[in-house]
């Protein structure tokens, strides 16, 4: 794998002032999605299931656990997973907070079990299960699946009245980020998202879009509302099947993000620190998040995008961002202040972030030279993209038990099954009979033309080579 030139490599530490700014850039990149998960879960459940401060603290703690498990060799930030929004809400409606949090902790344990299997049995079986033709479309679905969220944030969703102020804020955030990313030099070159967010926020304040009421009402210091098993609830495994299957999706997401990040920084993270260590870190982080009453963690494509676009892969910067997230979770005023950043600002920046994730999925296919002349690869990729982006869902209901497989879950399952059970294009067996005379150039050309439309691209050269060998044998006999 070609080693990319990084402004700061994984084991390097920028000067402290730069490191702080870079860490805040990662913090802002993950902030919108991380706080949105509790908001959406609570909306789906109709009650408070998760809280923003706990989500921030558990994402910070989870990232530090991940860094420890991977020996500081992988610049990954862990945040709240969108894949668990509906399952957590459904589990809560069935068994309350005990069902929801038991399910989250179980997913963490599934990760750990898979990591242990990989440690002792190797990852060949997993590579066969999840090859590039499955991983590539999966990454694309992750990025493109988030696209409607960005469009909604900037006020351009179908049927929504366009507010010119929101549109201006989003446009400024997007353009400033894009210009800084492509034209800036020096330190500003590696903080385009932070510059875009700050500029967009200032414009939003000028236009009167920012609501500072939450800041005035918040206390300076506040203890997050942690929910601890055996203290606040007893474990319940009734709703486990509602959440556990989602581990398949986040497993694909985990491998996809690490493959994407490997391509970005020019290091094979699947080999070093190894998939067993990255999964172990993600699993323990998710278990701890559930233990404290937070949402399941996952590798964040937003932060992977920041690494790719800024060329700053420093794990120390990621760790500093995690520490800031934990601190902010205890500071009511700061949490409230950051939460006042208009969605239009985050939406403008997300246009680039989410698109970058999707492009990295395309890069996985290109770098692994996936051959789309093969019908099997076309079927696998196209089926996954349509199911993943089209909102397909399958519900299995048996009495009080119900399992819904949708979106990324359904796409990954279908992609895996199609890849395993569909056979590659049939090869055409060609038998060359020994020749008794020399062929003229005209006859050889005619022979080539006669087979051109009969063979697959892969076989043409092979057959022609066989013809050449037989011709040579014929000449030697003569």
Image (cartoon, helix red, strand yellow):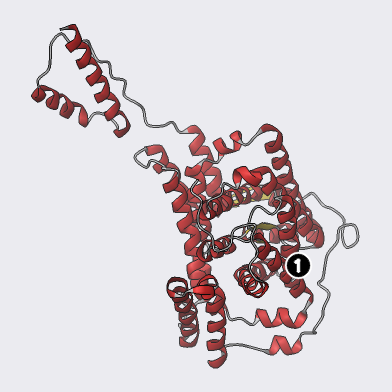
Where is residue 322 shown, x and y percent of the image?
71, 66
All told, the count of numbered labels is 1
Q: Which residue is mark 1?
A: 57
| Residue 411 vertical placement versus 317 (above, below) | above
Q: Nearer the viewer, residue 397 or 98?
A: 98
Q: Residue at x 57, y 84 (%)?
A: 201
In the depicted view, which residue is nearer to us: 62 or 378?
62
Helix, strand or loop status at disc 1: helix
The residue sitting at 70% across, 63% down in the picture is 319
| Image location of residue 103, percent across then percent down | 75, 53
Q: Is residue 392 visible?
A: no
Does residue 51 appear anywhere in the picture? yes
How far across and how far down the image is residue 254, in percent?
Answer: 61, 51
232 vs 286, left or right, is right
Vertical arrangement, residue 64 with respect to residue 478, above or below: below
- Residue located farthest toward the right when viewing the structure as drawn: 231
Q: Residues within 10 Å of mark 1 (few under 14, many from 20)?
A: many
Left or right: where does residue 41 sit relative to residue 132? Answer: right
Residue 1 vs residue 401: left or right? left
Q: Quadrant of the C terminus?
A: top left
Q: Position of residue 99 (x, y in %)?
A: 78, 56
Q: Is residue 155 above or below residue 360?
A: below
Quadrant for residue 422, please give it.
top left
Check the image and report above or below for 56 versus 260.
below
Q: Residue at x 48, y 68 (%)?
A: 352
């Amino acid at each position: 794998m070609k080693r990319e030139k990084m402004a700061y490599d994984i084991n390097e530490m920028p000067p402290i002032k730069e490191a702080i700014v870079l860490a805040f850039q990662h913090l802002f990149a993950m902030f919108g999605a991380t706080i949105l998960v509790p908001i959406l879960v609570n909306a789906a459940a109709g009650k408070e299931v998760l809280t923003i401060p706990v989500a921030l603290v558990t994402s910070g703690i989870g990232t530090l656990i991940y860094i420890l498990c991977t020996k500081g060799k992988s610049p990954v930030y862990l945040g709240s997973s969108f894949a668990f929004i509906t399952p957590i809400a459904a589990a809560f409606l069935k068994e309350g907070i005990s069902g929801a949090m038991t399910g989250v902790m179980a997913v963490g344990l599934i990760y750990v079990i898979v990591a242990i299997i990989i440690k002792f049995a190797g990852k060949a079986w997993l590579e066969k299960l999840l090859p590039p033709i499955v991983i590539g479309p999966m990454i694309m679905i992750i990025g493109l699946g988030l696209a409607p969220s960005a469009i909604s944030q900037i006020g351009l969703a179908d049927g929504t009245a366009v507010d010119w102020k929101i549109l201006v804020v989003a446009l400024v955030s997007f353009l400033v980020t894009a210009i800084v990313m492509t034209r800036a030099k020096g330190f500003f070159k590696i903080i385009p998202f932070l510059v875009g967010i700050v500029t967009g926020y200032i414009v939003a304040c000028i236009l009167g879009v920012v609501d500072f009421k939450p800041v005035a009402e918040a206390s300076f210091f506040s203890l997050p509302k942690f929910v601890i098993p055996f203290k606040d609830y007893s474990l319940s495994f009734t709703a486990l099947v509602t959440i556990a299957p989602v581990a398949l999706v986040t497993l694909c997401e985990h491998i996809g993000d690490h493959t994407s990040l490997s391509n970005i920084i020019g290091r094979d993270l699947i080999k070093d620190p190894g998939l067993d260590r990255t999964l172990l870190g993600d699993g323990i982080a998710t278990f701890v998040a559930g233990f404290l009453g937070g949402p399941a963690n996952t590798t964040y494509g937003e932060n992977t995008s920041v690494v790719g676009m800024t060329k700053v892969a420093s794990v120390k910067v990621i760790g500093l961002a995690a520490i800031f997230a934990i601190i902010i979770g205890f500071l009511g005023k700061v949490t409230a202040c950051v939460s006042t950043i208009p969605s239009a600002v985050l939406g403008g920046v997300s246009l680039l972030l989410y698109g970058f994730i999707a492009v990295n999925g395309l890069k996985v296919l290109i770098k692994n030279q996936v051959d789309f002349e093969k019908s099997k690869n076309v079927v696998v990729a196209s089926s996954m993209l349509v199911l993943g982006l089209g909102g397909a869902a399958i519900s299995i209901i048996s009495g009080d038990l119900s399992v819904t497989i949708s979106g990324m879950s359904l796409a990954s399952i279908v992609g895996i099954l199609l890849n395993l059970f569909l056979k590659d294009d049939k090869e055409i067996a060609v038998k060359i009979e020994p020749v008794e005379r020399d062929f003229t150039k005209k006859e050889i050309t005619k022979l080539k033309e006669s087979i051109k439309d009969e063979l697959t691209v892969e076989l043409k050269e092979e057959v022609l080579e066989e013809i050449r060998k037989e011709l040579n044998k014929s000449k030697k006999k003569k």
